Image (cartoon, coloured by chain):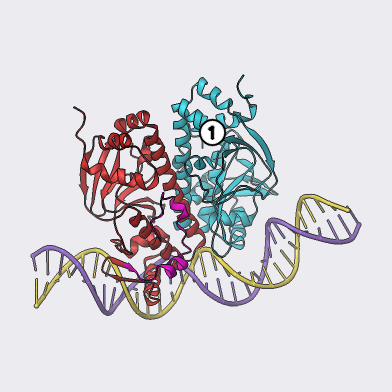
Chain colours: A cyan, B red, C purple, D yellow
Amino acid sequence: MGPTPSPELNGLVRKLATIAQLSGDDERAILALPARLKTFDEDNDLVREGQRPMECCLILEGLVGRYKVLGRGQRQIMSLHLPGDIPDLVSLELPVMDHNLGTLTPVRAAFLPHAALRELIAARPAVAGAFWRDSLIDAAIVREWLAGIGRRTARQRIAHLLCELCVRLRALRLIVDRIFELPVTQAELGDALGLSTVHVNRVLQDLRRDNLIVSQGRTLKILDWDRLRLAGDFDPTYLHLRRTAAL
Amino acid sequence: MGPTPSPELNGLVRKLATIAQLSGDDERAILALPARLKTFDEDNDLVREGQRPMECCLILEGLVGRYKVLGRGQRQIMSLHLPGDIPDLVSLELPVMDHNLGTLTPVRAAFLPHAALRELIAARPAVAGAFWRDSLIDAAIVREWLAGIGRRTARQRIAHLLCELCVRLRALRLIVDRIFELPVTQAELGDALGLSTVHVNRVLQDLRRDNLIVSQGRTLKILDWDRLRLAGDFDPTYLHLRRTAAL
DNA sequence: AAGTCATTATAACATTTGTAAAAATCGGAT
DNA sequence: ATCCGATTTTTACAAATGTTATAATGACTT
């Protein structure tokens, strides 16, 4: 008998289905991966800069941020990862982590041994292709963030990020409308957007005042998708989704 | 008889050697790729956003920038590519380009058909791995830029970029000392760093005044590597070079 | 119900960086 | 040698955003 097939890995299959087409055999091979489940509190690191992981972590539930801490302690979050993501897939090819992966919310994750992933990739070219594709999309998202931080105003950046998260969550079928949990402090938003907490606060108030969004507690509701998209100069092409979840 | 082996592809082999270990057979297979050579003037696009290329372009000579043009015409350069790079390797997996590739100098490039690259990848897992690794390093560099634009001052960003280019050029053995051509206008530097031309000018003058660099025409000389590295908060780990060209 | 801690909001002010325009410089063509 | 366009430099000013500090709010604990 092989390793116990874990229903938890369904999220990975679902995520990969949003970006690539896999056969039933491919999916079964993925589901047969051995996985070590683990849970984390808010604000914990899954992996740290400098480490040489022997496993990759698949997010099952919760929100994970990829970040660096620069010279004088300033943090920059470089990407946000949702369930189904394997944010440290990179460790398969680049043994030394050059960044941290930390939880922004409580997280459930599955750790997949490098050895098993390598076997899977060797045996199933389509899965290898899907993983490559996934890491290329990951990179495309970082490029879009780079362009935004480099050239967009604070208001555009925030609107853009909200649009991106909305589309990504919809693609994963984690939300159906345009209402979602944004369990992130304004300080964390600032770290992701290259802004100060105070300025994030100012801009969020503007967006609310302009009736683009509404938020109560952690729940965020996009009131006017078209105007928010416009405000954020948002075009989802860079997400490279197979069937763009209807905008 | 197979396709004519092109001595031009040596640059690709040399580049891959800086990040991965390939066997003689792997190298021969790479050199046997069919290539269509082409030259470009300064300020020309090799590939444009929206296109669906059927070939990848290998840079043989010159400097290429990957960029997007945002809403109100502002340009952001998201990466710089040196000889040996295949900046649109991504097009193998993501058919629609989400950015442009443009020359910053006159460029010689070799166009490699997707079909041939796919065969190579299928036949030679080590080459597939090297390509994956290459695109992961590409992404790591973009992340470092993102962190810089998000959280570093203009002076740090410029110093950091100069350090990065120096290390990358040395790794490729394109320079041996710390003197190199930087055939880039201050406007282009600004587009890469998310700064205005005027501010780039101000900071470059500061760096010269502080005797960190000297430049005459396009030739840039790093006068004080240690202080420049410090000024740029530069640590080459993120370049994931096999043997870090001695700092 | 009170107390504590994190988060959000507000305020006043400082600073970096951007913008616009013009002058100076440089490199290559004629 | 001279001219021309691009690039760099300078100047003056404007705007966006950062910083520091404090108050208000809210969520959770005891």
Q: Mark 1 lies on which chain?
A: A
Residue A233 seen from this side: no
Asked if the magenta segment contains residue B232, the reply would be yes
Residue B163 seen from this side: yes
User: Which residue is depicted at the point 35% across and 45% down?
Assistant: B17
Position of residue A232 measured from the top left corner of the image (x, y, whole percent): 50, 50
Position of residue B192 measured from the top left corner of the image (x, y, whole percent): 39, 58
Stretch in magenta:
B221-247
Q: Which residue lies furthest to the top in this view?
A: A1
Position of residue B25 measured from the top left corner of the image (x, y, whole percent): 31, 34
B131 displayed left or right of B153: left
**Residue at numbered disc 1:** A115
Q: What residue type is labelled 1?
A: Ala
Asked if the magenta segment contains residue A238, the reply would be no
Quarter of the image with the N terminus of chain A is top right
What secondary structure is marked by label 1?
helix
Position of residue B148 measured from the top left corner of the image (x, y, whole percent): 48, 59
B176 displayed left or right of C19: left
